Image (spheres, helix red, strand yellow):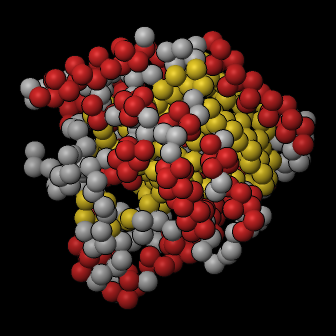
Amino acid sequence: MKRVFTGILLILTLISLSFGTVCAEGLQACHRVTNTFTTTTQKNKSEIKLWHAETALPEVTDEINALAEAWAEELGPELKSAGNSGKKNSRLDVEIRYSRTGLSWLSFLVQARTVYHQKLTDQRFTTRTYDMENGTRLYLTDIFEDDDDIWDTLSARVRQTLTDYWPDEEPDAEKLDRLCTREALEQADFTLHGMSLVLHYPANELYPDYHTLMEVTLFYPEIRDMMTEEAKMQTDNLSYYQTCALTFDDGPKAKNTPKVLDALMETGARGTFFVIGNLIKDNRYLVQQEHDEGHAIGSHNWHHGNVLKSSGHALRIMPQKVNQAMIKSIGIPVRYDRVPGGRYPRMIEVKAGWAYIQWSLDTYDWRGRKTSEVLNTVKKKIHDGDIILCHDIKDNTPESARQIVRYLEEEGYMLLTIDELFAKDGVELEKYKVYFRCEQGETSMRKD
């Protein structure tokens, strides 16, 4: 019955498209999640931060929270004693990530991250995807057709992507082979997002010295022909929603970046963080957290200085410096940059080798504006395809981000990462080019 309803709704959507008017869907009732956390301090001063999710279906709620609680009970007693300094912490974060697609599908990633003295020492995770109309759990075999060529294509993509991590190191060849078999792929952990399917793998399975996650991202347009009919409908988000990208500059910083991450975890949104290169080493655990919680990461140059005062040579070697630090942190380089102050012409002039991401909606949170003022700016200026500029180091930004996401979802927006925003229209980011937004493939500065 649900498939019939979904099909009828899709037909009505297509009809409205033909007449040039589309009413964006607000947040579906079955997609609503309340995600909160409690923090417990143990006798040895170690901390356990446990998230708890309430969904539209009690059976899904019970299963997801049981997974999280089991890890808290198993790993909590093993935490080492913490010191008195904040940098000598000992903590377990048991997180519940969630993301939606279509009109009724909802994905969860439950992960347990152990950090000691700001170093990630262990990570466990599992995923679940459900049809929230009936509670049915979905597998990759529900997403893709029963065709050997499809699974061979997925196998090749997984092999290439996982090999690209830590480019100076070789993955465990035997374990990699096992991960690329059809049997392993059919049981792989995955989540569905606004414009992508992501396969998740623990880094230490192939690279024993690392505990971050590795992601194999497949954008819906590139895999749509491989999908089942139901999956095609449930991932056709451009027929139901408008889109935008929420981005954050100037971090990471220990004071407010974690609060922004909590706001995104609470709301189920993924953002894009433009990270300053010389902050990565001392805040590696935060960059890893941004990556492991599913957010995209770009560069915000090596330092926040005025590029007009830097030599061409210094700017040309900047991508290498940033990427060396990034690879040490999460295993992969960044694909694009946002220049401090938006001074991209200088970077293009000297041919510093990145694509450059600007913005089309400035919230002016960097001025210390109140959340109400930030939200009013978004309400007045938001357009389909916008890139929203925020700063994760500002005190009001965590609450502003929370309210921006809540408002936009109710207004029919699906929040995407920068990578998803451009992939939805088949736009490939090119070196030495600048991008302000992505509305039906249009990437130029908005004129209004």
Q: Where is residue 287 shown, x and y percent of the image?
A: 58, 57
Judge whether 85 appears above or below 10 on screen. below
What residue do we see at 52% from left, 19% from top?
A: 132
Q: Is residue 59 left or right of residue 208?
A: left
Q: Where is residue 411 shown, x and y percent of the image?
A: 29, 24
What residue do we see at 48% from left, 60% from top?
A: 275
Judge whether 355 appears above or below 219 on screen. below
On-image quarter of the N terminus: top left
> Which image quadrant is residue 293 in?
top right
What residue do we see at 36% from left, 19% from top?
A: 6
Q: Where is residue 124 shown, x and y percent of the image?
A: 74, 44
Q: Where is residue 201 shown, x and y percent of the image?
A: 65, 52
Q: Nearer the viewer, residue 80 or 351?
A: 351
Inspect this view and state whether residue 25 appears.
yes
Q: Nearer the viewer, residue 3 or 49?
A: 3
On-image quarter of the C terminus: top left
What residue do we see at 89% from left, 47% from top?
A: 81
Q: Is residue 187 left or right of residue 115?
A: left
